[in-house]
Amino acid sequence: MSAHAEDQGSSLDMVKLLVAIVLLMAGIAGFYYFENWQGQPVSVLLRVLGLLAVVVVAAVIALNSHSGKKLLGFLKDSRLEVRKMVWPTRAETIQTTLMVMVIVLILAIFLWGVDSLLGWGVKSLLEGGGA
């Protein structure tokens, strides 16, 4: 019996993830800190560009960890599987949509009828049997 244990990331991977999280928090804090810097309003465009730069740097750091590499592998595999899928044609999609709409309409009419019948029955019972 051979058990295959998943490779655990090193402590350096944990440091990378923590650095990425700290960078994200610092980027968000900086976005709000520089709203009015030295009494002058800072352009929202500049603050957003700065925040995006920090997010990109944090993502690069996080994706270089063991967990990040596993995530990238998963995303690549998912993309490959989506390419293998056989998508329905336009005609098949329209037919299926129409069938669902007709069934929903029939079911709605049926439920309306059952509700009306039950409502009439309860009303008849409460009024004393319809006398």
Image (tube, helix red, strand yellow):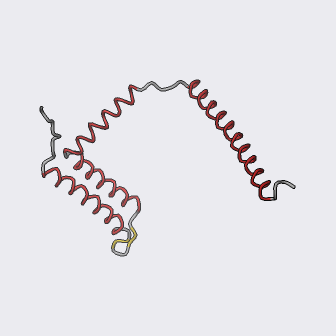
Q: Is residue 3 above or below residue 124?
A: above
Q: Nearer the viewer, residue 91 or 44?
A: 91
Relative placement, left or right, of 16 versus 98 is left
Can you tell which quarter of the image residue 99 is in?
Answer: top right
The quarter of the picture where the N terminus appears is top left
Left or right position of 11 against 117: left
How far across and down, in percent of the image, does residue 13 sit?
16, 50
Residue depicted at 81% across the width and 58% down the height: 128
Residue 108 quadrant: top right
Q: Residue furthest right?
A: 131
Task: Work out which quarter of the rendered image holds the C terminus and state it.
Answer: bottom right
Q: Residue at x 19, y 46 (%)?
A: 65
Q: Nearer the viewer, residue 83 or 112?
A: 112
- Image: 113 above or below 124: above
> Where does the image place residue 89, in percent across and percent down from the top left?
53, 24
Q: Is residue 105 above or below residue 44?
A: above
Residue 104 shown left or right of residue 124 in the figure: left
- x, y percent for residue 25: 29, 62
Q: How many marks?
A: 0
The structure residue drawn at horizontal position 77% and vertical position 55%, both measured from the top left corner, is 125
Vertical position of residue 99 compared to residue 63: above or below:
above
Write down the quadrant of residue 71 in the picture.
top left
At horizontal 59% and vertical 29% (from top left) the residue drawn is 96
